[in-house]
Protein backbone atom coordinates (compact mmCIF):
# COMPACT_ATOMS: atom_id res chain seq x y z
CA UNK A 1 0.00 0.00 0.00
CA UNK A 2 1.37 3.41 -0.96
CA UNK A 3 1.71 6.20 1.58
CA UNK A 4 -1.00 8.90 1.19
CA UNK A 5 0.66 11.84 -0.52
CA UNK A 6 -2.11 14.35 -1.27
CA UNK A 7 -4.13 16.89 0.72
CA UNK A 8 -7.83 17.65 0.48
CA UNK A 9 -8.99 21.23 1.10
CA UNK A 10 -12.53 22.49 1.56
CA UNK A 11 -13.64 26.10 1.24
CA UNK A 12 -17.20 26.16 2.52
CA UNK A 13 -18.58 29.61 1.68
CA UNK A 14 -21.83 31.55 1.75
CA UNK A 15 -22.85 30.89 -1.84
CA UNK A 16 -21.11 27.58 -2.49
CA UNK A 17 -18.65 24.90 -1.43
CA UNK A 18 -15.30 24.23 -3.09
CA UNK A 19 -12.91 21.32 -2.76
CA UNK A 20 -9.47 20.84 -4.17
CA UNK A 21 -6.75 18.20 -4.10
CA UNK A 22 -3.17 19.46 -3.73
CA UNK A 23 0.21 17.75 -3.81
CA UNK A 24 3.31 18.51 -1.76
CA UNK A 25 4.60 21.09 -4.24
CA UNK A 26 1.42 23.15 -3.92
CA UNK A 27 0.13 22.04 -7.31
CA UNK A 28 -3.66 21.65 -7.55
CA UNK A 29 -4.61 18.36 -9.21
CA UNK A 30 -8.38 18.41 -8.84
CA UNK A 31 -11.20 20.86 -8.15
CA UNK A 32 -14.91 20.57 -7.43
CA UNK A 33 -17.68 23.08 -6.74
CA UNK A 34 -21.31 22.93 -5.65
CA UNK A 35 -23.57 25.98 -5.34
CA UNK A 36 -25.37 26.46 -2.03
CA UNK A 37 -28.87 27.98 -2.14
CA UNK A 38 -29.91 30.46 0.52
CA UNK A 39 -33.36 30.43 2.06
CA UNK A 40 -35.45 33.56 2.69
CA UNK A 41 -38.35 32.46 4.94
CA UNK A 42 -39.21 36.03 5.96
CA UNK A 43 -38.08 39.52 4.93
CA UNK A 44 -34.63 40.11 6.39
CA UNK A 45 -34.08 36.44 7.22
CA UNK A 46 -31.33 34.51 5.38
CA UNK A 47 -30.82 30.83 6.19
CA UNK A 48 -29.11 27.70 4.88
CA UNK A 49 -30.20 24.09 5.10
CA UNK A 50 -27.54 22.07 6.99
CA UNK A 51 -28.19 18.81 5.13
CA UNK A 52 -28.07 20.52 1.74
CA UNK A 53 -24.77 22.10 2.70
CA UNK A 54 -23.26 18.74 3.72
CA UNK A 55 -24.46 17.06 0.54
CA UNK A 56 -22.94 19.84 -1.56
CA UNK A 57 -19.57 19.55 0.16
CA UNK A 58 -19.59 15.78 -0.38
CA UNK A 59 -20.38 16.33 -4.06
CA UNK A 60 -17.55 18.87 -4.44
CA UNK A 61 -15.09 16.48 -2.78
CA UNK A 62 -16.02 13.62 -5.09
CA UNK A 63 -15.64 15.88 -8.12
CA UNK A 64 -12.19 17.04 -6.97
CA UNK A 65 -11.05 13.44 -6.42
CA UNK A 66 -12.34 12.48 -9.87
CA UNK A 67 -10.48 15.33 -11.58
CA UNK A 68 -7.29 14.51 -9.67
CA UNK A 69 -7.52 10.88 -10.77
CA UNK A 70 -6.74 9.67 -7.28
CA UNK A 71 -8.41 7.53 -4.63
CA UNK A 72 -9.76 8.70 -1.26
CA UNK A 73 -7.01 6.58 0.34
CA UNK A 74 -4.41 8.84 -1.34
CA UNK A 75 -5.50 11.77 0.86
CA UNK A 76 -3.20 12.20 3.85
CA UNK A 77 -5.11 15.05 5.51
CA UNK A 78 -7.82 17.65 5.07
CA UNK A 79 -8.05 21.35 5.88
CA UNK A 80 -11.31 23.29 6.10
CA UNK A 81 -11.84 27.01 5.52
CA UNK A 82 -15.36 27.80 6.68
CA UNK A 83 -17.97 30.51 6.91
CA UNK A 84 -17.88 32.90 9.81
CA UNK A 85 -21.00 33.93 11.74
CA UNK A 86 -23.24 31.44 9.96
CA UNK A 87 -24.17 29.28 12.92
CA UNK A 88 -25.43 25.71 13.07
CA UNK A 89 -27.22 24.00 15.97
CA UNK A 90 -27.58 20.24 16.38
CA UNK A 91 -28.34 17.51 18.89
CA UNK A 92 -25.17 16.03 20.39
CA UNK A 93 -26.77 12.58 20.73
CA UNK A 94 -28.50 12.17 17.37
CA UNK A 95 -26.19 14.44 15.35
CA UNK A 96 -29.23 15.92 13.62
CA UNK A 97 -29.80 19.65 13.08
CA UNK A 98 -32.25 21.37 15.42
CA UNK A 99 -32.97 24.28 13.06
CA UNK A 100 -31.74 25.90 9.87
CA UNK A 101 -28.40 27.71 9.90
CA UNK A 102 -28.71 31.49 10.35
CA UNK A 103 -26.28 33.27 8.03
CA UNK A 104 -24.18 36.35 8.64
CA UNK A 105 -26.46 38.23 6.20
CA UNK A 106 -29.54 37.71 8.40
CA UNK A 107 -31.08 40.80 10.04
CA UNK A 108 -33.64 39.26 12.41
CA UNK A 109 -31.65 40.27 15.49
CA UNK A 110 -31.50 44.00 14.74
CA UNK A 111 -33.95 44.73 17.58
CA UNK A 112 -32.07 42.43 19.92
CA UNK A 113 -28.81 44.27 19.23
CA UNK A 114 -30.53 47.53 20.21
CA UNK A 115 -31.92 45.88 23.33
CA UNK A 116 -28.54 44.47 24.39
CA UNK A 117 -26.84 47.81 23.74
CA UNK A 118 -28.44 48.90 27.03
CA UNK A 119 -26.57 46.13 28.88
CA UNK A 120 -24.40 47.89 31.50
CA UNK A 121 -21.17 46.39 30.15
CA UNK A 122 -21.89 46.89 26.45
CA UNK A 123 -19.13 49.49 26.38
CA UNK A 124 -16.62 46.65 26.81
CA UNK A 125 -17.75 44.79 23.67
CA UNK A 126 -15.17 46.07 21.23
CA UNK A 127 -12.22 45.70 23.60
CA UNK A 128 -13.12 42.20 24.80
CA UNK A 129 -14.63 40.70 21.63
CA UNK A 130 -12.52 42.60 19.09
CA UNK A 131 -15.55 44.07 17.34
CA UNK A 132 -19.10 45.31 17.81
CA UNK A 133 -21.55 42.35 17.72
CA UNK A 134 -24.10 43.54 15.17
CA UNK A 135 -27.04 41.62 13.71
CA UNK A 136 -24.59 39.43 11.74
CA UNK A 137 -23.05 38.12 14.97
CA UNK A 138 -23.67 34.52 16.02
CA UNK A 139 -23.89 35.70 19.63
CA UNK A 140 -27.10 37.52 18.75
CA UNK A 141 -28.35 34.64 16.60
CA UNK A 142 -27.90 32.21 19.49
CA UNK A 143 -29.67 34.49 21.95
CA UNK A 144 -32.55 34.75 19.47
CA UNK A 145 -32.66 30.97 19.13
CA UNK A 146 -32.91 30.50 22.89
CA UNK A 147 -35.98 32.77 22.90
CA UNK A 148 -37.76 31.63 19.75
CA UNK A 149 -36.75 28.05 18.90
CA UNK A 150 -38.17 25.61 21.49
CA UNK A 151 -36.15 22.65 20.20
CA UNK A 152 -32.92 24.58 20.72
CA UNK A 153 -33.93 25.74 24.21
CA UNK A 154 -34.91 22.17 25.18
CA UNK A 155 -31.61 20.76 23.92
CA UNK A 156 -29.81 23.41 25.95
CA UNK A 157 -31.79 22.41 29.07
CA UNK A 158 -30.85 18.75 28.68
CA UNK A 159 -27.22 19.42 27.79
CA UNK A 160 -27.58 18.02 24.26
CA UNK A 161 -27.21 21.32 22.37
CA UNK A 162 -24.12 21.86 20.23
CA UNK A 163 -23.38 25.15 18.51
CA UNK A 164 -20.79 25.74 15.81
CA UNK A 165 -19.94 26.87 12.32
CA UNK A 166 -19.94 24.93 9.06
CA UNK A 167 -16.57 23.32 9.87
CA UNK A 168 -18.06 21.76 13.02
CA UNK A 169 -21.18 20.71 11.19
CA UNK A 170 -19.21 19.02 8.40
CA UNK A 171 -17.24 16.96 10.93
CA UNK A 172 -20.51 16.00 12.62
CA UNK A 173 -22.51 15.22 9.48
CA UNK A 174 -19.80 13.77 7.22
CA UNK A 175 -17.31 12.39 9.69
CA UNK A 176 -16.33 11.92 13.29
CA UNK A 177 -15.19 14.91 15.39
CA UNK A 178 -12.41 14.29 17.90
CA UNK A 179 -14.21 16.70 20.21
CA UNK A 180 -16.28 19.87 20.04
CA UNK A 181 -13.33 21.98 18.87
CA UNK A 182 -12.88 25.09 16.76
CA UNK A 183 -9.84 27.20 16.05
CA UNK A 184 -9.36 30.37 18.12
CA UNK A 185 -10.21 32.64 15.20
CA UNK A 186 -13.58 31.04 14.51
CA UNK A 187 -14.38 30.84 18.24
CA UNK A 188 -13.78 34.59 18.44
CA UNK A 189 -16.10 35.13 15.47
CA UNK A 190 -19.04 33.84 17.54
CA UNK A 191 -19.00 37.06 19.54
CA UNK A 192 -18.81 35.40 22.97
CA UNK A 193 -15.06 35.03 23.45
CA UNK A 194 -12.89 37.49 25.39
CA UNK A 195 -9.93 37.11 23.06
CA UNK A 196 -7.61 39.27 25.15
CA UNK A 197 -8.04 36.90 28.09
CA UNK A 198 -8.31 33.77 25.97
CA UNK A 199 -11.59 32.60 27.48
CA UNK A 200 -15.33 32.84 27.01
CA UNK A 201 -16.87 35.94 28.57
CA UNK A 202 -19.09 34.41 31.23
CA UNK A 203 -21.13 37.51 32.11
CA UNK A 204 -21.90 38.21 28.45
CA UNK A 205 -23.06 34.64 27.87
CA UNK A 206 -25.30 34.87 30.94
CA UNK A 207 -26.82 38.09 29.62
CA UNK A 208 -27.65 36.32 26.35
CA UNK A 209 -28.69 33.04 28.05
CA UNK A 210 -26.26 31.06 25.87
CA UNK A 211 -25.25 27.79 27.61
CA UNK A 212 -21.46 27.41 27.87
CA UNK A 213 -21.45 23.61 27.47
CA UNK A 214 -22.93 23.98 23.96
CA UNK A 215 -19.96 26.01 22.70
CA UNK A 216 -16.82 24.70 20.97
CA UNK A 217 -13.54 24.58 22.85
CA UNK A 218 -10.82 26.85 21.34
CA UNK A 219 -7.74 25.12 19.92
CA UNK A 220 -4.94 26.12 17.49
CA UNK A 221 -5.69 26.44 13.79
CA UNK A 222 -3.55 23.35 13.16
CA UNK A 223 -4.94 20.58 15.37
CA UNK A 224 -6.38 17.07 15.22
CA UNK A 225 -10.05 17.96 14.73
CA UNK A 226 -11.28 14.49 13.79
CA UNK A 227 -11.92 12.56 10.57
CA UNK A 228 -13.97 13.26 7.47
CA UNK A 229 -15.31 10.35 5.44
CA UNK A 230 -14.79 11.10 1.76
CA UNK A 231 -16.10 9.20 -1.24
CA UNK A 232 -14.51 8.77 -4.65
CA UNK A 233 -16.37 8.62 -7.97
CA UNK A 234 -16.18 4.80 -7.88
CA UNK A 235 -17.83 4.66 -4.44
CA UNK A 236 -14.66 3.91 -2.51
CA UNK A 237 -14.31 5.71 0.81
CA UNK A 238 -11.64 6.73 3.31
CA UNK A 239 -11.54 8.48 6.66
CA UNK A 240 -9.28 11.50 6.19
CA UNK A 241 -7.92 13.32 9.27
CA UNK A 242 -8.87 17.00 9.47
CA UNK A 243 -5.72 18.78 10.65
CA UNK A 244 -6.63 22.44 10.08
CA UNK A 245 -9.70 24.65 10.45
CA UNK A 246 -9.77 28.40 9.75
CA UNK A 247 -12.27 31.17 8.90
CA UNK A 248 -12.51 31.91 5.19
CA UNK A 249 -11.43 35.57 5.35
CA UNK A 250 -8.36 34.67 7.41
CA UNK A 251 -7.74 31.83 4.97
CA UNK A 252 -7.87 34.25 2.04
CA UNK A 253 -5.25 36.42 3.78
CA UNK A 254 -2.91 33.48 4.30
CA UNK A 255 -3.68 32.03 0.87
CA UNK A 256 -2.56 35.27 -0.78
CA UNK A 257 0.83 34.78 0.93
CA UNK A 258 0.15 37.63 3.36
CA UNK A 259 2.01 36.51 6.47
CA UNK A 260 4.01 39.45 7.82
CA UNK A 261 2.94 42.75 9.47
CA UNK A 262 1.64 45.18 6.86
CA UNK A 263 0.79 42.49 4.31
CA UNK A 264 -2.77 43.14 3.13
CA UNK A 265 -5.46 41.47 1.06
CA UNK A 266 -8.86 42.62 -0.19
CA UNK A 267 -11.59 40.12 -1.06
CA UNK A 268 -14.40 41.48 -3.22
CA UNK A 269 -17.42 39.25 -2.66
CA UNK A 270 -20.95 40.02 -1.51
CA UNK A 271 -19.16 42.75 0.43
CA UNK A 272 -15.49 43.74 0.28
CA UNK A 273 -13.20 42.76 3.15
CA UNK A 274 -9.79 44.31 3.75
CA UNK A 275 -7.50 42.32 6.07
CA UNK A 276 -4.05 43.42 7.23
CA UNK A 277 -1.60 41.25 9.16
CA UNK A 278 -0.62 42.83 12.50
CA UNK A 279 1.76 40.26 13.98
CA UNK A 280 1.82 38.89 17.50
CA UNK A 281 0.24 41.85 19.32
CA UNK A 282 -3.46 42.71 19.34
CA UNK A 283 -3.88 46.51 19.22
CA UNK A 284 -6.60 48.34 21.10
CA UNK A 285 -9.09 49.57 18.50
CA UNK A 286 -12.35 51.49 18.44
CA UNK A 287 -12.85 51.74 14.68
CA UNK A 288 -11.43 48.53 13.22
CA UNK A 289 -12.11 44.89 13.98
CA UNK A 290 -9.24 43.04 15.67
CA UNK A 291 -9.21 39.30 15.00
CA UNK A 292 -7.02 36.29 15.40
CA UNK A 293 -5.57 35.68 11.94
CA UNK A 294 -4.35 32.19 12.81
CA UNK A 295 -2.93 30.35 15.80
CA UNK A 296 -0.14 27.87 15.19
CA UNK A 297 1.02 25.44 17.90
CA UNK A 298 4.52 25.74 19.32
CA UNK A 299 6.70 22.74 20.18
CA UNK A 300 4.62 22.16 23.30
CA UNK A 301 1.31 22.42 21.45
CA UNK A 302 0.52 25.85 22.88
CA UNK A 303 -1.03 28.39 20.48
CA UNK A 304 1.09 31.21 19.11
CA UNK A 305 -1.37 33.84 17.92
CA UNK A 306 -1.04 36.10 14.89
CA UNK A 307 -3.55 38.97 14.75
CA UNK A 308 -5.06 40.94 11.90
CA UNK A 309 -7.16 44.04 11.42
CA UNK A 310 -10.28 43.83 9.30
CA UNK A 311 -12.77 46.26 7.86
CA UNK A 312 -15.47 45.74 5.30
CA UNK A 313 -17.79 47.61 3.01
CA UNK A 314 -21.51 46.96 3.20
CA UNK A 315 -22.08 45.80 -0.38
CA UNK A 316 -20.05 44.97 -3.50
CA UNK A 317 -21.38 41.89 -5.24
CA UNK A 318 -24.83 42.78 -3.95
CA UNK A 319 -24.56 46.20 -5.65
CA UNK A 320 -23.46 44.57 -8.91
CA UNK A 321 -26.50 42.31 -8.69
CA UNK A 322 -28.70 45.41 -8.16
CA UNK A 323 -27.22 47.08 -11.22
CA UNK A 324 -27.86 43.93 -13.25
CA UNK A 325 -31.29 42.84 -12.00
CA UNK A 326 -32.96 46.05 -10.81
CA UNK A 327 -31.35 48.91 -12.73
CA UNK A 328 -30.79 46.66 -15.80
CA UNK A 329 -27.56 48.41 -16.68
CA UNK A 330 -26.15 45.16 -18.10
CA UNK A 331 -27.19 41.54 -18.55
CA UNK A 332 -24.03 39.72 -17.42
CA UNK A 333 -21.46 40.59 -14.77
CA UNK A 334 -18.71 40.15 -17.38
CA UNK A 335 -19.96 43.35 -19.02
CA UNK A 336 -18.92 45.54 -16.08
CA UNK A 337 -15.29 45.94 -17.16
CA UNK A 338 -16.00 46.68 -20.87
CA UNK A 339 -18.74 49.15 -19.92
CA UNK A 340 -16.37 51.00 -17.58
CA UNK A 341 -13.69 50.99 -20.27
CA UNK A 342 -16.12 52.45 -22.84
CA UNK A 343 -15.69 55.92 -21.28
CA UNK A 344 -12.43 57.72 -20.35
CA UNK A 345 -13.75 58.69 -16.91
CA UNK A 346 -16.98 58.78 -14.92
CA UNK A 347 -18.06 62.08 -16.51
CA UNK A 348 -18.57 63.68 -13.10
CA UNK A 349 -20.85 60.88 -11.88
CA UNK A 350 -20.27 59.68 -8.30
CA UNK A 351 -21.87 56.45 -7.08
CA UNK A 352 -22.18 55.91 -3.31
CA UNK A 353 -23.40 52.28 -2.94
CA UNK A 354 -24.68 52.70 0.60
CA UNK A 355 -27.65 50.38 0.01
CA UNK A 356 -27.45 49.11 3.59
CA UNK A 357 -25.41 51.93 5.12
CA UNK A 358 -21.70 52.75 5.26
CA UNK A 359 -19.02 50.94 7.24
CA UNK A 360 -15.47 51.98 8.23
CA UNK A 361 -14.70 54.78 8.79
CA UNK A 362 -18.21 56.24 8.61
CA UNK A 363 -20.09 53.52 10.55
CA UNK A 364 -23.44 54.97 9.53
CA UNK A 365 -26.20 52.37 9.11
CA UNK A 366 -28.67 55.16 8.30
CA UNK A 367 -26.83 56.21 5.11
CA UNK A 368 -28.42 55.22 1.81
CA UNK A 369 -27.17 54.83 -1.74
CA UNK A 370 -27.01 57.68 -4.22
CA UNK A 371 -25.85 58.40 -7.76
CA UNK A 372 -24.89 62.04 -8.04
CA UNK A 373 -23.68 64.25 -10.87
CA UNK A 374 -25.96 62.85 -13.58
CA UNK A 375 -26.49 64.88 -16.75
CA UNK A 376 -28.35 64.15 -19.97
CA UNK A 377 -25.02 62.97 -21.33
CA UNK A 378 -24.47 60.39 -18.61
CA UNK A 379 -24.39 56.82 -19.92
CA UNK A 380 -24.44 53.32 -18.47
CA UNK A 381 -20.67 53.33 -18.83
CA UNK A 382 -20.33 56.42 -16.64
CA UNK A 383 -22.49 54.89 -13.88
CA UNK A 384 -20.71 51.52 -13.94
CA UNK A 385 -17.30 53.21 -13.94
CA UNK A 386 -18.41 55.37 -11.01
CA UNK A 387 -19.31 52.20 -9.14
CA UNK A 388 -15.85 50.71 -9.73
CA UNK A 389 -14.37 53.99 -8.52
CA UNK A 390 -16.48 53.70 -5.37
CA UNK A 391 -14.64 50.45 -4.53
CA UNK A 392 -11.32 52.25 -4.72
CA UNK A 393 -12.59 55.14 -2.60
CA UNK A 394 -13.98 52.82 0.08
CA UNK A 395 -10.80 50.78 0.27
CA UNK A 396 -8.75 53.99 0.46
CA UNK A 397 -10.87 55.16 3.40
CA UNK A 398 -10.22 51.85 5.16
CA UNK A 399 -6.46 51.90 4.51
CA UNK A 400 -6.21 55.51 5.68
CA UNK A 401 -8.04 54.57 8.88
CA UNK A 402 -5.65 51.66 9.46
CA UNK A 403 -2.66 53.96 8.97
CA UNK A 404 -4.08 56.64 11.27
CA UNK A 405 -4.96 54.13 13.99
CA UNK A 406 -1.88 51.88 13.89
CA UNK A 407 0.83 53.57 11.86
CA UNK A 408 0.88 50.64 9.42
CA UNK A 409 1.35 51.76 5.83
CA UNK A 410 0.13 49.21 3.29
CA UNK A 411 2.58 49.33 0.38
CA UNK A 412 0.71 46.98 -1.97
CA UNK A 413 -2.63 45.24 -1.91
CA UNK A 414 -3.31 41.70 -2.97
CA UNK A 415 -6.82 41.37 -4.37
CA UNK A 416 -9.30 38.61 -5.12
CA UNK A 417 -12.99 38.04 -5.83
CA UNK A 418 -15.23 38.01 -8.86
CA UNK A 419 -14.92 41.68 -9.86
CA UNK A 420 -11.11 41.46 -9.93
CA UNK A 421 -11.31 39.32 -13.07
CA UNK A 422 -11.80 42.69 -14.77
CA UNK A 423 -8.52 44.43 -15.63
CA UNK A 424 -10.38 47.74 -15.65
CA UNK A 425 -11.65 47.21 -12.10
CA UNK A 426 -8.16 46.43 -10.83
CA UNK A 427 -6.56 49.36 -12.66
CA UNK A 428 -9.14 51.82 -11.34
CA UNK A 429 -8.48 50.65 -7.78
CA UNK A 430 -4.70 50.95 -8.24
CA UNK A 431 -5.16 54.48 -9.62
CA UNK A 432 -7.35 55.60 -6.73
CA UNK A 433 -5.28 53.90 -4.01
CA UNK A 434 -1.93 55.07 -5.32
CA UNK A 435 -0.32 51.68 -4.62
CA UNK A 436 0.18 48.54 -6.74
CA UNK A 437 -2.74 46.12 -6.82
CA UNK A 438 -1.69 42.48 -7.19
CA UNK A 439 -4.01 39.88 -8.72
CA UNK A 440 -2.69 36.33 -8.31
CA UNK A 441 -3.13 33.92 -11.21
CA UNK A 442 -4.51 31.35 -8.78
CA UNK A 443 -7.92 32.29 -7.40
CA UNK A 444 -8.97 29.59 -4.90
CA UNK A 445 -6.78 30.99 -2.16
CA UNK A 446 -8.97 30.26 0.88
CA UNK A 447 -8.96 26.56 -0.05
CA UNK A 448 -5.24 26.77 -0.77
CA UNK A 449 -4.59 28.11 2.73
CA UNK A 450 -6.61 25.28 4.26
CA UNK A 451 -4.51 22.76 2.33
CA UNK A 452 -1.22 24.38 3.32
CA UNK A 453 -2.20 24.46 6.99
CA UNK A 454 -3.14 20.78 6.85
CA UNK A 455 0.30 20.16 5.33
CA UNK A 456 1.86 21.93 8.30
CA UNK A 457 -0.10 19.52 10.48
CA UNK A 458 1.48 16.61 8.59
CA UNK A 459 4.94 18.09 9.06
CA UNK A 460 5.42 18.58 5.32
CA UNK A 461 6.72 22.09 5.98
CA UNK A 462 8.40 23.50 9.09
CA UNK A 463 6.57 26.83 9.16
CA UNK A 464 4.80 29.54 7.17
CA UNK A 465 8.02 30.74 5.54
CA UNK A 466 8.61 27.26 4.10
CA UNK A 467 5.27 26.98 2.30
CA UNK A 468 5.27 26.73 -1.51
CA UNK A 469 4.57 30.04 -3.27
CA UNK A 470 1.39 30.96 -5.09
CA UNK A 471 1.26 29.14 -8.43
CA UNK A 472 1.46 31.11 -11.63
CA UNK A 473 2.60 34.69 -12.32
CA UNK A 474 0.65 37.48 -10.64
CA UNK A 475 -0.64 40.49 -12.58
CA UNK A 476 0.47 43.78 -11.02
CA UNK A 477 -1.51 46.94 -11.73
CA UNK A 478 0.60 50.04 -11.12
CA UNK A 479 -1.14 53.38 -10.45
CA UNK A 480 -1.24 55.70 -13.44
CA UNK A 481 -3.16 58.64 -11.97
CA UNK A 482 -1.33 61.62 -10.50
CA UNK A 483 -1.61 62.27 -6.76
CA UNK A 484 -3.41 65.56 -7.47
CA UNK A 485 -6.03 63.85 -9.65
CA UNK A 486 -6.44 61.08 -7.08
CA UNK A 487 -6.97 63.48 -4.20
CA UNK A 488 -9.39 65.64 -6.18
CA UNK A 489 -11.53 62.61 -7.01
CA UNK A 490 -11.44 61.44 -3.39
CA UNK A 491 -12.53 64.86 -2.15
CA UNK A 492 -15.51 64.76 -4.51
CA UNK A 493 -16.36 61.26 -3.23
CA UNK A 494 -16.25 62.44 0.40
CA UNK A 495 -18.60 65.27 -0.46
CA UNK A 496 -21.02 62.81 -2.04
CA UNK A 497 -20.79 60.56 1.02
CA UNK A 498 -21.68 63.48 3.29
CA UNK A 499 -24.93 63.94 1.36
CA UNK A 500 -25.98 60.30 1.85
CA UNK A 501 -25.29 60.12 5.58
CA UNK A 502 -28.03 60.02 8.24
CA UNK A 503 -30.58 59.74 5.44
CA UNK A 504 -32.96 57.36 7.20
CA UNK A 505 -32.65 59.35 10.42
CA UNK A 506 -33.46 62.57 8.62
CA UNK A 507 -36.46 60.92 6.97
CA UNK A 508 -37.71 59.67 10.33
Image (cartoon, rainbow, N blue to C red):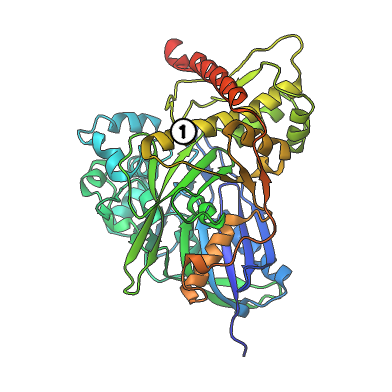
Q: Quadrant of the C terminus?
A: top left
The residue under the point 63% across, 73% down is: 23
Q: 10 Å neighbourhood of mark 1: few (<14), some, or many (≥20)?
A: some
The percent coordinates of residue 245 (x first, y second) are 46, 62
Q: Nearer the viewer, residue 485 or 497?
A: 485
Q: Nearer the viewer, residue 191 or 410?
A: 410
User: Is residue 12 shown above or below 208?
Assistant: below
Work out whether 24 lies above or below 95: below
Quadrant (top left, top right, bottom left, bottom right) of the N terminus: bottom right
Q: Is residue 326 left or right of residue 54?
A: right
Q: Secondary structure at mark 1?
A: helix
Q: Is residue 486 visible?
A: yes
Tell me residue 345's x, y (percent). Answer: 72, 23
The front one of 443 and 204 is 443
The residue where tag 1 is placed is 400
Question: In the displayed structure, would residue 187 be above or below residue 388?
Answer: below
- In the rendering, at what x and y percent does residue 59 appear? 65, 62
| Residue positioned 69% across, 26% down in the render | 385
Q: Residue at x 39, y 34 (%)?
A: 404
Disc tally is 1
Where does residue 414 sit, x and y in percent of width and height?
58, 47
Q: Residue furthest bottom?
A: 1
Q: Is residue 369 visible?
A: no
Amino acid sequence: MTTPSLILAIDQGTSGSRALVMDRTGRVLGYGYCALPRLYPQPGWVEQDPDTLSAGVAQAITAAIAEAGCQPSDLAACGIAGQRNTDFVWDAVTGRPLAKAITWQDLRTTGLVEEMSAWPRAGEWRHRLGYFPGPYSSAMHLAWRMRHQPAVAEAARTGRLRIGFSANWLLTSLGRPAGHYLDYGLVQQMGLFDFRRGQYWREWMEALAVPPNALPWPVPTVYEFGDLQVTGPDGSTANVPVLAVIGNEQAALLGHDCRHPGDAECSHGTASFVDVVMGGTAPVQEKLNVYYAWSLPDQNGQPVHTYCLEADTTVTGAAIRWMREQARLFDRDEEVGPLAASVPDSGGVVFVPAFTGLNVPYNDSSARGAILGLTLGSSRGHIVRAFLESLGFQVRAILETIHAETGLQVARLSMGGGITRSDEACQIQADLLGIPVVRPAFTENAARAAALLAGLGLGWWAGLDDLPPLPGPATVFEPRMSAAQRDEAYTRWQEAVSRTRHWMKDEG
